[in-house]
Image (tube, rainbow, N blue to C red):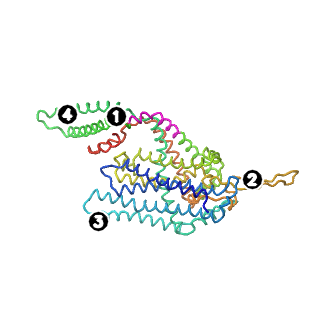
Amino acid sequence: RATPAAASAVVIFPCVFQAILIFSWVYVRKYQSRRESEVISTITAIFALAVALITSALLPVDIFLVSYMKNPNGTFKVWADANVSRQIEDTVLYGYYTLYSIILFCVFLWIPFVYFYYEEKEEDDSNTCSQVKTALKYTLGFITVCAVLLLIGAFVPLDIPNKKNSTEWEKVKLLFEEFGSSHGLTALSFSISSLTVIGMLAAITYTAYGMSALPLNLIKGTTSASYERLENTEDIEEVKQHLLRIKSKCRDGRPLSSRDRRTLQQLEERLRTLRRRERHLESIEKSWWTKACEAIRPLKIVWGVFFIIVALLFTVSLFLSNLDKALHSAGFDSGFIILGTNLTNPLNMLLPVLQRVFPLDYILITTIVMYFIFTSMAGIRNMGIWFFWTRLYKIRRGKTRPQALLFLCMILLLIVLHTSYMIYSLAPQYVMYGSQKYLVQSNKTIDGQPRNVTLVSKDCDADAPEDQCIVTRTYLFLHKFWFFSAAYYFGNWAFIAVFLIGLIVSCCKGKKSVIEGEVDDDDSDMSDDELSVYYH
């Protein structure tokens, strides 16, 4: 029988899907290079970015569905019998496995193949068959890694160490045994968890920095285009004078020394860069977009203050949640899993209050997920793509190479996998049970005798009977392997440390240039035309 939730989903989900596709197309087209754009790499980047955003939307849907099956008083709704509940849980589970399988396909096969194919095309554009063979040869390495992860996951032991006097642990262990009991599903979960650890490292690097850099950049703004243009003109005159002094040494026919020749070459390159800056600054100074940005400058400051408050709220909540695990969890051998909330945090306090007004709590969870995604994008844009201490690519508007876009989308796919655990760390009880309640007996005693036995509702927790509270599939995914949960726990401490360091660095840095990252010494003169689309 159709339910109101199902009817709403039929209307909402297609609209959300279309919005995600449109955003992915606009975002990729905004940053990709016009001169180096390729159809295959563009489609791959758009598809991968859309998959990342769709996967991030699963968490709010999962929480909503388990919560919607129960009434606010703790009783199940009429239509939510055992069969319907099982069907809903299975539907969410199949949704996770489908999207996670697509992520595995993208990370280990499709994106590497397109990347290496384009790399070969740059070196040899004559033989397509040879390019495909070489790309497949390199991609085979990624496929081998994926196969190894699947094999390990199929046979890895899942036993959770027993704890004394803990019947709650037995209950959780039974849930894990029931969840994805086949070796195939376990193998997929292990592979996804392995990628989630890599996503954790990417989140520590990019998301933590983006949470500090994005709001402070909005608050501080950029330098004036006219002021930068004046300084640039002075630099051009200074370089010209220096060039004239060096060239005057060879007027009488004497050759220049090797040192002077190197200096002359460096100054000529510097002069070309300054002239490109001059053209960009002139375009920006006259553009309608710059005038519009100046008009909404107060709004940017408001948004910056709001984002920094949200970032500090998240950091405090994450710190208190991790401290709670350190003090009250079952320990390292269980992955620091905590079955209740002993130290509350601001977000855990806010969500129960918002539950009273539908759908404010789901809007907040969705907003948090999107906040992590967009701060990750901001962090990648500001830092570029690095391999240890080597910068591989820069993310620049209208000038990003196809390989960089593929890396960007792969990193976002990995960060999205870790986002669910970040949300769980911020609000563990809510992610586990949503807004579910269950009924418990309340006995009133008069003169030592029990009287007026009544049923009262209580928020679902680990003490609730198994048939009264439904655990989200997200929670079971996050804690299927205790050793990954332990890694996530230590990753949260690293995330907090990197955020604080990034906050200090962002506060100490001055205003960004209005053409920050748009003009580099290694750019060609033809690349100047690529930005005219945005400034005219």
Badge 2 marks a residue whose secondary structure is: strand
**Image quadrant assignment for residue 518:** top left
Badge 3 marks a residue whose secondary structure is: helix
Amino acid identity at mark 2: Val
- Residue 532 percent across, percent down from the top left: 32, 42
Q: Earlier in the sequence, mark 4 or mark 2?
A: 4
Mark in front: 3 vs 2: 2
Q: CA distance from mark 4 to mark 1?
A: 34 Å
Q: Going by the image, does 344 lie left or right of 501?
A: right
- Residue 520 percent across, percent down from the top left: 31, 42
Q: Where is 148 relative to 17, above or below? A: below
Amino acid identity at mark 1: Glu
Q: Which residue is mark 2?
A: 456
- Dot 1 crowding, Cα within 10 Å, few <14, some 14–19, many 20+: some
| Region of the chain picked out in magenta, as a range | 290-308
Tag count: 4
Q: Earlier in the sequence, mark 1 or mark 2?
A: 1
Query: Per the image, is 300 magenta?
Result: yes
- Dot 4 crowding, Cα within 10 Å, few <14, some 14–19, many 20+: some
Q: Earlier in the sequence, mark 1 or mark 3?
A: 3
**Image quadrant assignment for residue 161:** bottom right
Q: Which residue is mark 1?
A: 285
Q: CA distance from mark 1 to mark 3?
A: 48 Å
- Residue 8 percent across, percent down from the top left: 57, 55
Q: CA distance from mark 3 to mark 4?
A: 52 Å
Badge 4 marks a residue whose secondary structure is: helix
Kindly identify which numbered label has been placed on residue 246.
4
Q: Which residue is mark 3?
A: 129
Q: Where is 160 relative to 15, above or below? A: below
